[in-house]
Image: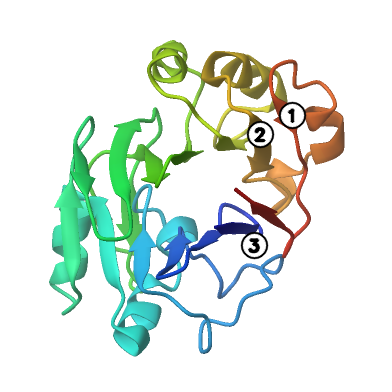
Amino acid sequence: MKITYHGHSVVSVQTDSHHILIDPFITGNSLCDLDPNTVKADVILLTHGHNDHVGDTVAIAKRTGASIVALNELAVYLGQQGLDAHGMNIGGAYDFDFGRVKFTQAFHSSSYEEEDGTFIYTGMPGGILLTIDDKTIYHVGDTALFSDLKLIGERNDIDLAFVPIGDNFTMGPEDALVACDWINADIVVPVHYNTFPVIEQDPVAFTDKVATGKGMPLKVGESITL
């Protein structure tokens, strides 16, 4: 399968049978190389409800018929928009036709801001363990450093991890390096940086310091094949 980074926390996973999008923040994301009007999607996975992660989910799902997998309150909210949404919760796993999804903890917040400024509660934030065939991708989501990342790394053989490094809203590079040690993935790709001035970071400087696995600062549009 081919896994591609699209800026901020946007990731696509292409298998022989499915196009999977994670956190498709495209419109308003100057770093993203995708077009919400043409991007392919059979499944959309969401780590939490913030606008810079839900992004273009509604428009893409309405155009493509993509199913959505998200934490329960966010899934219910999106289901109320007429979308096909499967709700899950922290620690739960489910076997879909495209692969196995398990949500992990993430220490962050989660709400969706409507156009009129109203905030909608969207449940807990999470990380996503996505296992397809015998390969596991861990999208850590937006999170602070927390010690159970070590437990997650010990209990899962993680081939590829997407780890936030931006600071201010998530853990910064120093804490993210500790997270990488604990997660112990074969390949680590930094995400959630440089989209806004307050999260500007040097991804190469970060990946050069990754002690376990291989740090890989993917440029927007670059892919990894597992």
> Mark 2: few, some, or many residues within 10 Å (few <14, many ≥20)?
many
- Inspect the image, locate mark 1, and give the three-letter code of the amino acid beneath it: Lys
Label 3 with label 2: CB-CB less than 8 Å: no
SS for dot 1: strand
Pinpoint residue 169: horizontal percent, then vertical percent: 55, 37
Visible residue check, residue 165: no
> Mark 1: few, some, or many residues within 10 Å (few <14, many ≥20)?
some
Q: On screen, 151 above or below 105?
A: above
* Residue of label 3: 6
Label 3 with label 1: CB-CB less than 8 Å: no
- Inspect the image, locate mark 2, and give the three-letter code of the amino acid beneath it: Val
Q: Nearer the viewer, residue 211 or 135?
A: 135
* Residue of label 1: 214
Point out which mark residue 162 bears. Answer: none
- Inspect the image, locate mark 3, and give the three-letter code of the amino acid beneath it: His
Point out which mark residue 188 bears. Answer: 2
